[in-house]
Image (cartoon, rainbow, N blue to C red):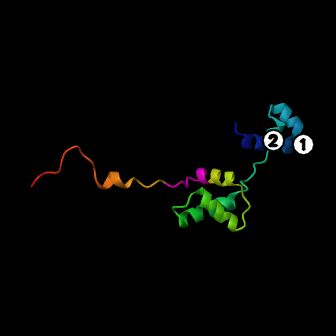
Amino acid sequence: MRPAVRREVVGHLQVAYDISERRVCQATGFGRSSQRYRKRSDPQVTLRMRLKELAAARVRYGYRRLHILSRREGCEVNHKRTYRIYRDEGLSIRPPPPHGCLRHPVSGRSPPQG
């Protein structure tokens, strides 16, 4: 059973039988710590959105440059956090292909005489 469902069951039993949370958890075998657990939202949502916007506008910028831009906008953030968000969001830039390999394929033969 999922923890969210357990919380609902405990809440229902508390109201139905008018007993304490502690007694309901003891009777059902559910842990009180999971009953009282509250999910925390990501505090860096605004930073994530701003990094996505900057990365979309400046495609060739890496996380270091985006970190500098976000700092200039007044966002006090550690460079390691910037890198973690940058990596999690899949914003990494791909290196360009080498120029010599695609334009002029090298072969061991001489060009045809013609």
Dividing the picture into quadrants, the one containing residue 22 is: top right
Q: Secondary structure at mark 1?
A: loop
The quadrant of the picture occupied by the C terminus is bottom left
Dividing the picture into quadrants, the one containing residue 86 is: bottom right
Q: Residues within 10 Å of mark 1 (few under 14, many from 20)?
A: few
According to the image, label 1 marks what residue? 18
The quadrant of the picture occupied by the N terminus is top right
Q: Is residue 106 left or right of residue 87?
A: left
Tell me the magenta residue range: 86-93
Q: Earlier in the sequence, mark 1 or mark 2?
A: 1
Along the viewing direction, whichever of 19 and 46 lies nearer the viewer? 46
User: In whole angstroms, how far apart are the C-alphas of marks 1 and 2?
Assistant: 17 Å
Amino acid type assigned to the residue bearing label 1 in the image: Asp
Amino acid type assigned to the residue bearing label 2 in the image: Gln
Q: Residue at x 61, y 61 (%)?
A: 66
Q: Based on the picture, tell me whether residue 44 belongs to the magenta stretch.
A: no
Along the viewing direction, whichever of 111 and 48 lies nearer the viewer? 111
According to the image, label 2 marks what residue? 35
Residue 74 x %, y %:
72, 67
Q: Give the main secondary structure, helix, strand or loop, of the magenta stretch.
A: loop
Residue 40 x %, y %:
75, 51
Residue 29 x %, y %:
80, 31
Q: Is residue 35 above or below residue 102?
A: above
Q: Residue at x 70, y 39 (%)?
A: 2
Q: Residues within 10 Å of mark 2 (few under 14, many from 20)?
A: some
Residue 112 x %, y %:
13, 51
Q: Residue at x 85, y 42 (%)?
A: 14
Q: Residue at x 90, y 40 (%)?
A: 20
Q: Based on the picture, tell me whether residue 88 belongs to the magenta stretch.
A: yes
